[in-house]
Image (cartoon, coloured by chain):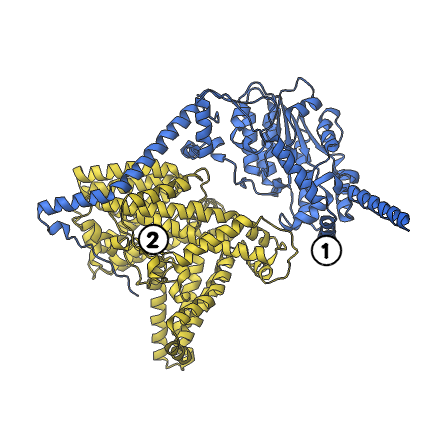
Amino acid sequence: MTHATKSITSSASDLPSPQKRSLSAVRWRAARPMVMAAALLTVIYLSLAAVVIAVDPHNVYRWGPQPRIEPGNTPRDVVIDWIDVAAKDSSYDTFLVGSSVTEMYTPEYLKGILGPDAKVINLSYGGPRPRDRDLVLDQLVKSDTVKHVIVSFEWTYIRDPDVTNISFPAFLYDDDIANDLRMVNFPTIRTTFSVLGGQRFYSNDDDARYKRYVDGMYASFQRPEEMARIQREVERHRAQIGASSGRDCASFQAINEQLVPNLKALSDKGVKVDVMIPISSYAFYYVRRNDISPTLLDEMMVARRCLVNAASDIPHVSIFAFDDDPAIAGDLANFREVGHLYDPAILSNFISAITTGKGRLTRKNFPRHENAIRSAVENYQTTNTRLDMVAARSETEQAASKSSTS
Amino acid sequence: MIFTDPLFLFVLLPITLAVFYTIAYFRGKNSALAILFIASVIFYIPFGTASAILLVLALIVNFSVAVAITYLSDSNKSRRTIYLSGQAYNLISLCYFKYKIVTVLFGPSAGFGIDIAGLAIPAGISFYTFHGAAFLADAYSREKNVSQFLGQLTSSRTVLGAFSRYGAFVSFFPQLVIGPITYISEFNPQIQSKRFLRLNPIDLAVGLGFISIGMFKKVVVADNLAPTVDIVFGAADIGAEISPIQAWIGALAYMGQLYFDFSGYSDMALGLARLFGLRLPINFFSPFKANGFIDYYRRWHMTLTRVIARFLYTPLSVAGTRYAMFNRLAPIPAHLVSLWLPMLINFQIIGLWHGALWTFVVFGLMHGFFIALETEIRASKWYKSYKKTTSPLVVGTIERAVFFLPLLLSLAMFRAESVSGGFHLYSQMFGLAFDARSLFDMKEPVLMLMGAFFIIYCCPNSVELMRRYRPAIMTYENKSYGLPILRGLWRPGWVQAGYISVLVVASLYYVSRQPPFLYQGF
């Protein structure tokens, strides 16, 4: 084995002084552009960092012009940078903390359900994970104006508590100031200069694009081939779908160490908290077992049970779920994807349950709820009333056309 | 802190550079090295206060032992005992903190011992421990650089100076967390040189070039391949059905991620050290261009290979050969004890060095087996005559093609979250589940992969690019493969300044996303 150390030969040190100086000058001349570029980049970055931190466009510090989110705006995925902007804004007292399932609710729509006095903002973003959800709830716990929080309880709570959404800027909301320089990215710099230019309200004007996206998703899901594919998966995994995961409540650390303490903290402040379990289709458990967990159904049921046991008795806290109704969760016509509800009427019922109390889970009624879902999932046959109607209409038309031809 | 963190790049590094050269000018070498030591400890503190205390403790113990065995005479019987105690400290701390040996032996309820072992694995513990162990071995074997490095210890001031030098050597931040593992014979001549501490603009230019290239490799290439890798290996771990195309994309993406992550780190380490006028040994030299596993280990994590070979393979092989000779073993058993067994043990240790996981055990077994097989094939008459009669270009191409699949499969096992997950991925790669539900949109990962593998196989590495400026200490003499036209020489200038600006700005686009380097976990 050779590990030859190349000694450093120094021809420069043997040269007479003027030559040494000229060699040094040549070197400096050669290296100057690189050094200047590096120095320039450093100076520009640090200057921008100073401006960004001074302006504080995300409202994470105590100073700055304290920008706000445009009343009536639904920020959707960009809201991850604006959690403190919303939480510190006294014009909001009701916060929907959800996921892609609840992203479509506009403040106006929510007001229509919760009442005209609700000062509501939707903080839903796609793919929340336990750690980032915890950070969002932490910001709300710190808020002085919060009166009502609606929080969705997704499957991700079966994951470990340190799992984080890859796009979520956790560095903005954690206690470590040493990582705050990471906020100096291109979008933040742009926002900072907008704030300096006088902008005080943020908005994400993507309603039309979002609608196109959701409608496109629905159209591509509502196809007979997609249903046939789901049915194949259902039949293939039916025997294992109800298998036990072996998990108990102690293993759901994200619920025990993050969600429940946050619910208690909000409750202690007198905040009304509604935990909404989003409606997933029964096909969801068959399709997503492939990439979430082979025992997804059991884990989700145990997780719900643990949540109900731990939180349903906390004052001001209510837990709601509706997916024990096969007419909703069993019919894929209601969905744009196995885990995403589409039907506006059902979506409306889902939120209005907060006011009516329908679908509330308690320790007492939970076993019936769990059994109903387990049984419905285990015996599930792919159903899509919309496609069935289309097929029936098409058959009728064909028959009619045949009879008219003959 | 990690190298790509803006706090490091734009705050700690410029301050350390400025203070280092200012102190070097006014106060000399010892003070300048003390600055490097202090900066290294500051760099390390974000990994945890307990980890930093453990680092300083390891430095104190190893320094004390090294001083003792350097200044005790060979005839003093306690010299060997002190040396062995020092190495025992290194081994025990590694087993205790990295391998959680107490937990493994006594289970998770062994009381106080468990509580300490329950700490997160201290970052870089295997690197600084190997550093310290190699230094002790050099001190024990009376390597001439050791006594020169430590100097005459006549007063507390000289002891403090020697400790600062030692601290700077072992904990020097460019190599602290992921290596390379440097020998004192490589470090000491540099700090004894008259040129050390002189601000050489070429060092700055070369260093900045390396840093920008390395940052781009890590932040733009490796980190953009990571999501695909996470999805595919996560799905494999739960036994999901994966379409063969996506399973291959996942395995290839990990190959690319690991390559660019480690290559990026290695480039940044060379560049950062060079800013301070120091050269580190090369740790990474286009390993996927290797023509087999033997060549691969002369190109991948080269400083670990040489440390393991020095302390493990060579003694085992020598002992095996002696045993075979004294016992007059038949050729095959002799071969077994002198070559195969040492190789298998060597690669098992290399596998386990990454952590106490069964996937690493299987990875070590695979590589040990492949190396032994390759050694036998290369020593066979058939191979020698084939090589003589065939064009080197054809031989090289065939060797690389043959080498690719075992490498890909072994790296997939290395990344897998469990052995069963690794084997499940293999079954999906060679399976027929073409109608499996798509796990990700393939357009972007495929484009990324094409770009990544183009760079891997068609572009020169950074050391080749900058070879005019002797960018690093050669660890092994490696051949450069590929067309010479692609190995155009790099010279500092306005064009290169433009390149580094583009690379840095592209990397800063992802500044909010700071995942650690993969080797940080080892």
Provide the letter of the chain coloured yellow. B
Q: Chain of mark 2?
A: B
Query: In the figure, B422 relative to B27: above or below?
Result: below
Q: Which residue lies at the image location 23% right of the left edge and 58% below the top edge?
A: A6
Q: Is residue B36 left or right of residue B44?
A: left
**Circle 2 residue:** B462
Quick check: can you spot residue B355?
A: no
Farthest top residue in view: A117
Residue A176 vs residue A139: left or right? Answer: left
Q: Are marks 2 and 1 in contact (CB under 8 Å)?
A: no
**How far across and how far down the image is residue B64, in percent?**
26, 49
Q: Between residues A79 and B516, which one lies in front from this camera angle?
A: A79
Q: Quadrant of residue B511?
A: top left
- Residue A217 placement (x, y as % from top left): 66, 41
Chain that is blue in the image: A
| Quadrant containing the N terminus of chain B in the rendered view | top left
Examine the rendered structure and indicate whether residue B477 appears above or below residue A12.
below
**Mark-to-mark CA distance, 2 and 1:** 51 Å
Q: Is residue A15 left or right of residue A385?
A: left
Q: Quadrant of residue B74?
A: bottom left
Task: Report crowding for label 2: few under 14, some 14 to 19, many 20 or more residues within 10 A (C-alpha).
Answer: many
* Amino acid type of the residue that numbered disc 1 sits on in the rendered structure: Arg
Q: Position of residue B243 (x, y in %)?
A: 61, 56
Look at 45% across and 56% down and name the residue there.
B453
Instruction: Count numbered badges in the picture.
Output: 2
At label 2, the amino acid type is Ser
Which secondary structure, mark 1?
A: helix
State left or right for residue B15 relative to residue B121: left
Front position in the image: B127 or A96: A96
The residue that mark 1 highlights is A236
**Direction front: furthest residue:** A405
